[in-house]
Image (cartoon, rainbow, N blue to C red):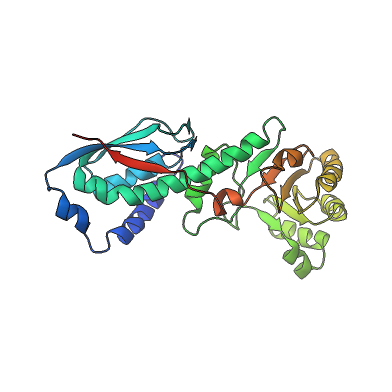
Amino acid sequence: MSELDRAYVEDLVRRALAEDLAGGVDVTSTATVPADQTAVGDLVARADGVVAGLPVAAAVFAAVDPRVVVEPAVRDGDRVRRGAVLATVSGPTRSLLSAERTALNLLCHLSGVATATARWVDAVSGSGAAIRDTRKTTPGLRALEKYAVRRGGGRNHRMSLSDAALVKDNHVIAAGGVGKAFALVRAAYPALTVEVECDSVDDVREAVAAGADLVLLDNMTPAEMTEAVAVTRPAGVRTEASGGLTLDAAGAVAATGVDYLSVGALTHSATILDIALDLRDG
């Protein structure tokens, strides 16, 4: 769990388990499983994908019962095929069943984010462009989702509103222009990276002239992006494509020369990677 804050994960797991064990007991498992019964089970991928969240799933099992042993068979970031065993869990049967759903909810979701990210990364492979996430994350899960993006081969944008400045259209309207908005941010926070959202190539020229570190090309066509890159590259200003991007068009967007593709769908629309806990017979 070296890339994840242990206290954050433990708090999240505690709150997640409170939803399933609100009454303090798993009534079905308690009624059907002898208290002294033990079992061994496998976490099995039901589809091809990229794994993320195994340490988090292990933390769920440990929180339910520290006697449960989790033995990973793969590592976060590994690409797996359908049917692959991701980890083996062993311990009191009641505990395995009580922890199952919470552990799988987190593991399936994070693996889904990593899998979606890997598809985008593959789509721009060889172009030099990188895939970046956004702040369009599930409230309370941002650190985990951004971790999953990294495991899928993507890069993180800012974690919070204080990490870097992003001058968007509403800031420009409020300040009275691209150049003025940039100047105000740079004066207030001279050490921070300042990115400016641009709706046109003219906006890009203004942002570059103002001294922007990075420009966000919002809903531009590939032709406009190519023109924007011709403006920014001689000045050493990086570019980030954003808005309306699709996986099918990712390669064409990357071919314009942009440095990043900003993809909110990595976190806000990722489909889970189907993973199950299969107890072994006997």
Residue 203 occupies which quadrant of the picture?
Answer: bottom right
* Quadrant, the N terminus: top left
At horizontal 73% and vertical 40% (from top left) the residue drawn is 259
Q: Residue at x 52, y 41 (%)?
A: 114
Location of residue 197 in the rendering, given as x and y in whole percent from the top left corner: 75, 56
Is residue 204 rendered to the left or right of residue 250? right
Indicate the quadrant where residue 237 lies.
top right
When asked about the image quadrant of residue 71, the answer is: top left
Answer whether residue 57 is visible to the viewer in this image.
yes
Name the residue located 42 percent from the left edge and 39 percent from the top edge.
46
> In front: 167, or 264?
264
Left or right position of 68 against 120: left
- Quadrant containing the C terminus is top left
Point out residue 263 in the picture as x, y percentages from the top left corner.
Answer: 64, 49
Q: In this view, does 240 lie to the left or right of 11?
A: right
**Where residue 65 sits in the image (x, y, percent)?**
23, 47
Q: Which of 205 and 109 is in front in this view?
A: 109
Q: Is residue 5 shown to the viewer in this render?
A: no
User: Measuring 22% from the left and 47% from the top, which residue is drawn there?
Assistant: 95
In this view, 179 is above or below 234: below
In this rendering, the count of numbered labels is 0
Q: Which residue lies furthest to the bottom in this view?
A: 174
Q: Which of 108 and 143 is in front in this view?
A: 108
